[in-house]
Amino acid sequence: MRILVVEDELRLADTLADLLGQEHYLVDLAHDGLTGLDDARSGIYDAAVVDIMLPGLDGLELVRRLRGEGSALPVLLLTARAETADRVSGLNCGADYYLTKPFAREELLACLRALLRRQGEVVSEELTYGDVKLNLLTGMLSCGNRQATLSAREFALMRLLLANRENLLSKETLLVKVWGYETEVEGNVVEVYVSFLRKKLKHIHSGVRIQAVRRMGYHLQQGGA
């Protein structure tokens, strides 16, 4: 899953990125409201964590504009203001949850999981297809008793493939979802990482294959070449 963090305090933004990264989320940072709004409009994010006090455009207006444009992106607002009126304002503008600073690591993660679950994301400890399992907490890919450790990009790519199973995903979709909307990496990076995953599936003796369909994309397949 890819999370957008809009936070102008650089140290806190980096801390949030590290925290979410440890939970196997892919994280992009924006440090002002206008950039955050533009990024949120891209459609590649599963959720956004947005500070209210931002330069350029505050978090409340950012969310208000998103909702006015019809975006259903789950938004968790962060603020140092704990008054009831402030919380009401945050929720009324269209935010899904309001978290007051300072907050506990576990509270932030629990709120984020709840938002993703509310949006229909299946939140569980693993994804399975055929004989292969991907543990979403440890990032471990397994088949029976054999396991393979995945890098962050490998994990994100495998998660997308498992979540869509036999449905085709275009190379462009995978590139945007895993590497970001404004990535500068070459398009063949998808093929490179698919190759990495194929080797790891072979290593754990899985019968699951990543099938390429010319000019259309990739999907999972049980058995076969």
Image: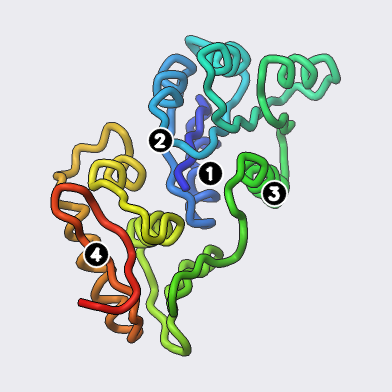
Return the x and y of residue 135 as percentages of the image width and height. 52, 69
Q: Tag 1's secondary structure?
A: helix
Q: Which residue type carries mark 1? A: Thr
Which residue does the numbered mark 1 point to in the structure image? Answer: 15
Q: CA distance from mark 2 to mark 3?
A: 22 Å
Asked which quadrant contains residue 87, the reply is top right
Return the x and y of residue 131 as percentages of the image width and height. 44, 79
Any mark on residue 211, and which? 4
Q: Tag 3's secondary structure?
A: helix
Return the x and y of residue 11 as percentages of the image width and height. 51, 36
Residue name at image x 45 percent, y 70 percent = 129
176 to the left or right of 165? left
Any mark on residue 44, and which? 2
Question: How many residues crowd around disc 1 within 10 Å: few (fewer than 14), some, or many (20 or more)?
Answer: few
128 to the left or right of 104? left
Q: Nearer the viewer, mark 3 or mark 4?
A: 4
Q: Which residue type carries mark 2? A: Ile
Question: How many residues crowd around disc 2 within 10 Å: few (fewer than 14), some, or many (20 or more)?
Answer: some
Q: Nearer the viewer, residue 196 or 23?
A: 196
Q: Nearer the viewer, mark 4 or mark 2?
A: 4
Residue name at image x 59 percent, y 33 percent = 74
Q: Which residue type carries mark 3? A: Ala
111 to the left or right of 201? right
Which residue does the numbered mark 3 point to in the structure image? Answer: 110
Asked which quadrant contains residue 53, the reply is top right
Specify the farthest residue to the right.
84
